[in-house]
Amino acid sequence: MAAQRLQEALPVDTFVWDQNFTTGLEAVDSQHQMLIETFNDLSEVLQHCNATGEDAGLEQAFERMLTYAQYHFAEEELLMRSSGLDERHVRRHIQQHQQFIDQVGTMWRARAALQDPAQSFVGFLASWLGLHILGIDQSMARQLDSLAQGLSAEQAFAQEMQVHDQGTQALIRMVGRLYHVLSVQNAELARANALLEERVAQRTHELEQANIRLEAFARTDGLLQIANRGYFDDRLQATCASALRRQQPLGLLLIDVDHFKRYNDSYGHPAGDACLQAVARAVAQALPRSTDLVARYGGEELAVILPDTDASGTAVVAARVVAQMAALALAHKTSDVAAHVTVSVGAVARMPAHKDGAAQMLADADAALYHAKAAGRNCWQMAAG
């Protein structure tokens, strides 16, 4: 269905999806299909805008496409790092990801200068997607296959540098030239637009920077400087869906500061705020990977998302959180648990039963947190199942 929609929405001589564009990596190919869907959605809105002059939903469609592209890039980069691919390939791959983000942003901001924004923009996306899959992604897949056959990362990279199929290589070069031409063309349009409307562009830049700061603010808890509840909810939903697609487990922690009301009553609210900030830093330091997320769940509760983490790994992190708080040794004179600030942790780890399994995982983690408190606090408990 995705392939059919792509062929209908894009010029046939620009990009055609078929089995030759698969990588053989199920998760990557699935993400490519979803990326194509976001391209098609954006194309439809752009064409509707061209026909009616109405831009309702235009920014949202672009943001959905860009957000999913960034998610896909992050997943690929995590796969490359965790698989131990040669660093030369990893650097080049990440550079291409960043180039796309930069170029698509530049083109989007300058779309008013395009004679046919829908045709130009979608043609640009299609040529990039062809280059992305036929070039760097299929190269990544071949190197992963070589690693599985026992080659070292250096040997796999060296082998990849040899020419495989002349026809495919010629096609990649052709698509690459098309992508280069479109990139240069769009960059020239952007520069012309900037010269003609310099003052407007400056104001637009200021507004964009303000929007970036506003977006960051909207995702961040102002006191603790970690993710807020809204961003946590979104990430948990996305991570659940990703875990289900890739058939990988997901770990989740709910963390509550023991007797925090007593702390506030004894030391005052400013000290209570400083205590929560120290707890947030300690929890963040207990997380093993940059892909893990700590967020403020509400009041004195924090939550942690642990992608690709089974029950044993989740238990290790939960125990580390409890130990990290003990090492912090932040005095709590009115606690009947210990002389220092402690936390109770509820943990759950499993592959979600369905893509909307976030609510059940939260409920199970909350139940485990209740058991940790009933067990005397200053400990962690794992949900059953």
Image: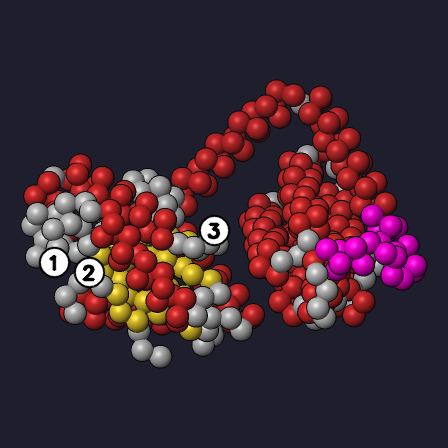
Q: Is mark 3 on a helix, strand or loop?
A: loop
Q: Mark 3 points at which residue?
A: 290
Amino acid under label 3?
Answer: Ser
Image x and y of residue 310, in percent: 43, 70
Q: Can residue 9 be seen in this view?
A: no
Number of numbered discs overlaid on the protein picture:
3
Instruction: Say which quarter of the image contains residue 68.
Output: bottom right
- Please identify the quadrant where the C terminus is shown: bottom left
Q: Name the residue under label 1.
A: 337
Q: Does the magenta stretch include residue 163?
A: yes
CB atoms of marks 2 and 1 within 8 Å:
yes
Instruction: Decide which of tag 2 and tag 1 comes sooner along the chain.
Output: 1
Q: Mark 2 points at which residue?
A: 378
* Above or below, comparing residue 66 to residue 268 in the picture: below
Q: Which residue is drawn at 31% across and 48% down?
A: 282
Q: Which residue is drawn at 12% across and 55% down?
A: 338
Predominant secondary structure, magenta span: helix
Q: Marks 3 and 1, how far apart in space?
A: 32 Å
Amino acid under label 2?
Answer: Asn
Q: Is residue 215 visible?
A: yes
Other residues around mark 1 within 10 Å, as few (<14) / some (14–19) / many (≥20)? some
Instruction: Decide which of tag 3 and tag 2 comes sooner along the chain.
Output: 3
Specify the segment rendered in magenta.
154-176
Q: Nearer the viewer, residue 144 or 175?
A: 144
